[in-house]
Image (spheres, rainbow, N blue to C red):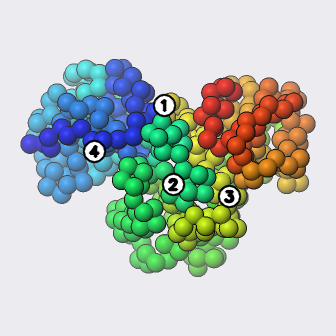
Amino acid sequence: RHAPAILPTMIPRTLEAVLRSSATHYPVVTVTGPRQSGKTTLCRATFPDKPYVNLESPDVREFARTDPRGFLANYGAGAILDEIQRAPELLSYLQPLVDADQQPGRFILTGSQQFEVMNTVAQTLAGRTAVLKLLPLTIAELAAAGISPGTDQLLLSGFYPRIHDGGLDPTRALGDYVETYVQRDIRQLITIKDLALFEKFVRLCAGRIGQLLNLQSLGNDVGISHTTARSWLTLLEASYVVFLLQPWHVNLGKRQIKTPKLYFHDVGLASYLLGAEVVQHISRHPLRGNLFENLVVGEALKYRYNRGKRSNLFFWRDAKGNEVDLVVENGADVLPVEVKAGATISPDYFRGLTAFCQRMKEPPQNAALVYDGAERQRRTGVTIWRSADVDVMLDECS
């Protein structure tokens, strides 16, 4: 037995076109991403005729684990298997099934723990599955649905679909998210004796968004070892809470920073962890600039994933403190992007871009500045964009 195919309502997702296309080429399509990013809703809306199986359900999971062949025999024509990391053993039994019948788009898998899902998928379904990543909503997806909050409201509410679909209070919804995540997901991944200490760690990570990662300092502030801090950060990466932006240092000499920068996949979650509860808290927050930078970097990452591509994003910083917030690799060319949270352009905004371009043997064809203003401008050597137009910027420059 399986749940009836009820078409969920959803804000249309950019990834849907890639999901449909992948299902015409591969017998299995795997969609990973954070909890509540919309994976289940997207897959069920895209494939409404497929049986839907939720492996979070204890009885379903028990059947899948104890009798995988019998379980899969119920879904010979295929199915949507939700939260596959809850029964990874199934993948070994799925492999011979799809080898025997390679009908495209037969099974759609979702998972919200990227390392566990990806390792298992890579070992058992290599060459048989497309792997897509669905992050929370983008500014463009919200705008297409007629939702256009101001910048500070976006920084507060973030992009989880449930908040916007249901008009939920973001503080309450994000509080529930953190509690569920820490109490359930983290305990599935690892035994943490002191959950309060782990929660403190997550909050202190939010206080370091857009900054160079210093695990020693982070561990000291929490009261844990450097090794534990690294282990816990890996957990946050594995469950799509944070990601690391690596430094770019091709052909620019050796005196470059080699430490990554820390960001959250959802800027609203970071704002919640920083204690913001209303828009006024954001507008006056000392880390508003970091939150705005996180928003823009996150939009650029979603742009790549929503087109079925891997991240091509880096940042640049030299030993003298010159920095460019985002370096987008496009083949042999790069697009340097500076991010500024101000609404009025200042000459100082271009200092990092100028330093970067001067270091390059061949100056990049384009350079960009993303700010919190309302106008798009073309200046000599640099185009100025609104934060709402990151996707347009990347379209033009790719």
Which residue, given by chain and number where applicable, does mark 2 sit on?
158
Picture quarter with the C terminus = top right
C-alpha separation, residue under disc 1 versus residue under disc 4: 20 Å
| Up/down of 224 relative to 131, above or below | below
Residue at image position (56%, 36%) is 303
Image x and y of residue 73, in percent: 11, 35
Q: Nearer the viewer, residue 279 or 184?
A: 279
Q: CA distance from mark 3 to mark 2?
A: 14 Å
Task: From the viewer's perspective, tell me whether residue 242 is left or right of residue 324.
Answer: left
Q: Earlier in the sequence, mark 3 or mark 1?
A: 3
- In the picture of the structure, the residue carrying the numbered disc 4 is 82
First in sequence: mark 1 vs mark 2: 2
Q: At numbered mark 1, what does the secondary structure look like: helix, strand or loop?
A: loop
* Residue depth check, mark 3 versus mark 1: number of the one nearer the observer: 3
Foreground: disc 1 or disc 2: 2
The label on residue 308 is 1
* Type of amino acid at the residue the image marks with label 3: Asn
The answer to which of marks 3 and 2 sits earlier in the sequence is: 2
Instruction: Assign a secondary structure to mark 3.
Output: helix
- Answer above or below: position of 360 versus 268: above
- The amino acid type of the residue labelled 4 equals Asp
Q: Which residue is mark 3?
A: 290
Residue 353's disc number: none
Can residue 382 be seen at all in this image of the molecule?
yes
